[in-house]
Image: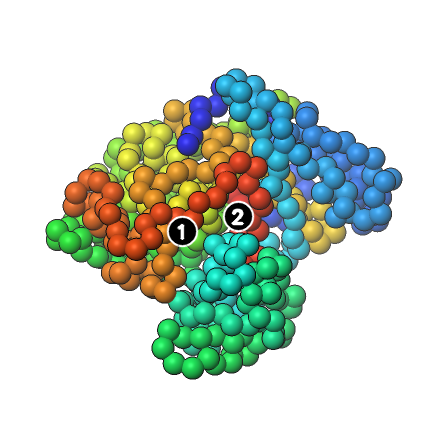
Amino acid sequence: MTTPRRSTAAAFVLTTLLAACGGGDYDGGNPPPLTCSVADQQSWLSSYFNDNYLWYAISPKPSPSSFSNVDAYFDALLYGGGDLIPGGGGARWPSDRYSGHQSTASFNQFFGDGQTMGYGLAVAGLEVTGQPTAPLYVRYLEPNGPAALAGIQRGERVISLNGRPASDIIAANDFSALTASSTGDRLTVVVRPPVGADRTVVLTATTYALTPLQNNKVVLSPGGKKMGYLFVKDMISQVDSPLSASMADFKSQGINELVLDLRYNGGGLVSVGAKLASYAAGTRGSSQVYTTLLYNDKQQASNQTTLFSNPNNWTGFSKVYVLMGERTCSASEQVINGLRGVGINAVGIGDTSCGKPVGFLPRDNACGTTYSVVNFEGVNARNEGRYFDGLAPTCPVAEDFTKPTANPDDPLLVAAAAHADTGSCPILAGREQPQARSVTQRARYNGADGAERTGMTVR
C-alpha cells in the first residue's frame, strides 16, 4: 500500500537529462572521470554517490583500493537497507535492489531509438521460482523480435534452451540464455504447443524496433459495456503517437471504461507515464499534481512536480482498470499511484506490483557505461509513496499463460470486465489467487526471464 512521505532521508541531483535519457554531455556536476582507468572510474563513482545517491547519508563508503574492478566497487556502494525511515511509523528502508548499469549504447538504443537487441522471447520464470517440475511457459514475445517472427507463441511450454532442460534452468534460476551478447548469437529453443509435437526453433539475435503499445481494441463486458483496452509495454517516447490515436478513437466511440494492461511494463519515462495517466483522468486530473520527485538533502533545489494535462480535451474515463503484476514497475506503478492521488479509482487486477517508488537520472561515465543510480523518490498529490512492498491489486487474479493477452478468456481481462458490470471482484473458476510470496526484503527482478527493463527516469 502507499505510505505518506513525511520526510526525506536522501534523493538527488536533477541534472539536465540527456536527449535520450542517458549518456551525453556533461551537465555541470560530477564531471566524468579524467581517464577510464579503474582508479579514476571508482573515484568518479564515489563522488557521484556521495552527492546524488538517495541514501548517500546512510550507505556504505568503502575504500576503492579494496576492489580490483569497477563493477565490484559499484556493488559495494549500494545501500543494504534496515535503517528506520524518518517519520515512517517504524518502517525501514529496503535494500537497494534498483540501481544498476549497462552499456551506454544499449541504453540509448532502448530509450532513444525505441529498439533493442536480442531474441524477443520472455518466459514465466519468476512465477516458477523454486519449482523445477513446473511448466515453463512462453509469456511474452516482442512482435518484431526473432521469436515471434519464427512462430513461437505465448502459452507454449519451453522444454529446453540451448539443450538445457527447463527443470535445470528453473532450479538454478538461470535464464541467461535468453540474453544475447551481440547480434548473430544463436538460441536453440525446444517448445511444446498445447496441441501437437515438440518442435525445435533456432533463433538468431537481431536488433529490432520495440512495439510499446499493442492490442488497442474495444472489448465488451458480459453486461454489454464497451471498454477500451491498451497493452502498454514500455514507457518510451515511441508510445506517444499510437497512444494519441488510440485515445482519440476511444473518445470518438464514447468509451467510458478503460483497461490499461501494464502487467509487463517495467517502467521508463516519467513524462510518458504522466501522459498515459492524463488521458485516463481527463478533466478530473487536469492541472493537478501527478507526481513530485524528491531529491536528497543536498539537492533539494532540484525537487520537481509534474502535473496532469488533458491531451484529449475531454472528461476522461469514468473508471480505469489496471492489469498488473510483479513486473509492473516504477513508471507504471506511478500511473496507479498518480491517479489515486487525485481521487481516481484505478482498480488493480492481477498481482502485487514490483515495489519501486524511486527513480534515476541515468549518467554516462564517458567510458561506455551508463549508471542508473537511485536519485529520487516519487509521491502523488496526497504525498503518498514508499510502496516498497508493491501496490496490492484490488482483485487478486492469477495469470493464465496459456491465454493470449487481450483474449476474451484472459482471466485478468475477464475480471476487469466483470468488475465493470458489478462493481465487485468476480469469483473465477480455477486458481483465483496469485501465488503467495513474501513481500519483505524482496529480491531484485532484472528482467532476466525476458524483456522487461525496470527503471523510471525523468525527461
State the SS at label 2: loop
Q: Nearer the viewer, mark 2 or mark 1?
A: 1
- Which numbered tag is attached to residue 402? none
Q: Position of residue 375 (x, y in %)?
A: 60, 34
Q: Position of residue 334 (x, y in %)?
A: 43, 38
- Which numbered tag is attached to residue 263? 1
Relative side of 279 to 43, left or right = left
State the SS at label 1: loop
At label 1, the amino acid type is: Arg
Quarter the N terminus occupies: top left
Color scheme of the displayed model: rainbow
Q: Residue at x 55, y 54 (%)?
A: 130
Q: Quadrant of residue 64?
A: top right
For label 2, count other residues whose C-alpha is less than 10 Å away and answer few (under 14), some (14-19) or many (20+): many
Q: Contact, CB < 8 Å: mark 2 with mark 1?
A: no
At label 2, the amino acid type is: Thr
Relative side of 383 to 251, left or right = right
Q: Position of residue 66 (x, y in %)?
A: 85, 40
For label 1, count other residues whose C-alpha is less than 10 Å away and answer few (under 14), some (14-19) or many (20+): many
N-terminal of the pair, mark 2 or mark 1, is 1
Q: Residue 308: in sight, yes or no?
A: no
188 or 380: which is nearer to us?
A: 188
Q: Residue 192: in sight, yes or no?
A: yes
Marks 2 and 1 sit apart, C-alpha to C-alpha, by: 12 Å
Q: Position of residue 88 (x, y in %)?
A: 51, 21
What residue would you read off at disc 2?
454
Q: Residue furthest front?
A: 133
Q: Quadrant of residue 185?
A: bottom right
Q: Residue at x 71, y 43 (%)?
A: 75
